[in-house]
Image (cartoon, helix red, strand yellow):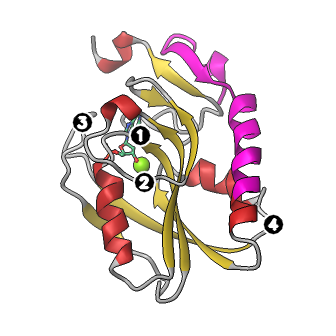
Amino acid sequence: MDRADVENDLEKVLLSQEQLHARLDELAAAIDADYAGKQLLLVGVLKGAVMVMADLVRRLHTDVQMDWMAVSSYGSGTKSSGVVRILKDLDTDLTGRHVLIVEDIIDSGLTLSWLLSNLRSRGPESVEIATMLRKPEAAKVEVDVRYVGFDIPNEFVVGYGLDYAERYRNLPFVGTLAPHVYGA
Ligand code: IMP
Ligand code: MG
């Protein structure tokens, strides 16, 4: 899917595929340096983190394993409720593991801060967070994030794994939607 496929739905491209990939090169280099000689478990948060995970792991030289969690944080619409439910749990025992949570976006931070304390309670050696996007103005709780791709304005974005009503995840870039898409 590309820009031409969604031209009428799109307001603007916020981050191009080239920008995302260039930043991933830098993040992968930082992660490789920090975890040199260690085994790392990457925990992806479904479904949004699929793209970041796929592009990140192929850039890493570190010995990594991947596992996935699905959580639901939104009751409805586009606002975080703070109520988190595990829809799919990890297959991996975290005892003694170095864990890096891989996220698409941190908005209010409520999902991540819940996930962080949940994973920390399972006896890992370390837990850190990598996110492609972060909205600093939307933060409701402080979350200590080790790797951030881009800080973006407090707007609803789609693409590169991020959806609106499960659509637009397969756009290779990050963009904002035209108001008519929201039913305006
Ligand atoms: P938080 O708990 O508010 O930080 O919400 C995190 C989750 O909300 C993300 O993993 C996304 O699934 C979703 N989300 C937050 N902001 C956006 C956005 O701008 N576009 C699409 N999904 C978003
Ligand atoms: Mg998500």
Q: Which residue is mark 4?
A: 61
- Ligand 1 positioned in quadrant: top left
Which residue occupies the foreground of this view, 81 or 179? 81
Q: Earlier in the sequence, mark 1 or mark 4?
A: 4
The image's mark for residue 79 is: 3
Q: Position of residue 168 (x, y in %)?
A: 51, 32
Q: Which residue is mark 1?
A: 166
Q: Is mark 3 within 8 Å of ligand 1?
A: yes
**Looking at numbered disc 2 in the image, what kind of residue is underneath it?**
Asp
**Element on which disc 1 rests:** loop
Q: Are marks 1 and 3 in contact (CB under 8 Å)?
A: no
Q: Which residue is mark 2?
A: 144
Q: Can residue 6 be seen in the rendering of this structure?
A: no
Q: Is residue 175 above or below residue 162?
A: above
Q: Earlier in the sequence, mark 1 or mark 3?
A: 3
**Looking at numbered disc 3 in the image, what kind of residue is underneath it?**
Lys
Q: CA distance from mark 2 to mark 4?
A: 25 Å
**Looking at numbered disc 4 in the image, what kind of residue is underneath it?**
His
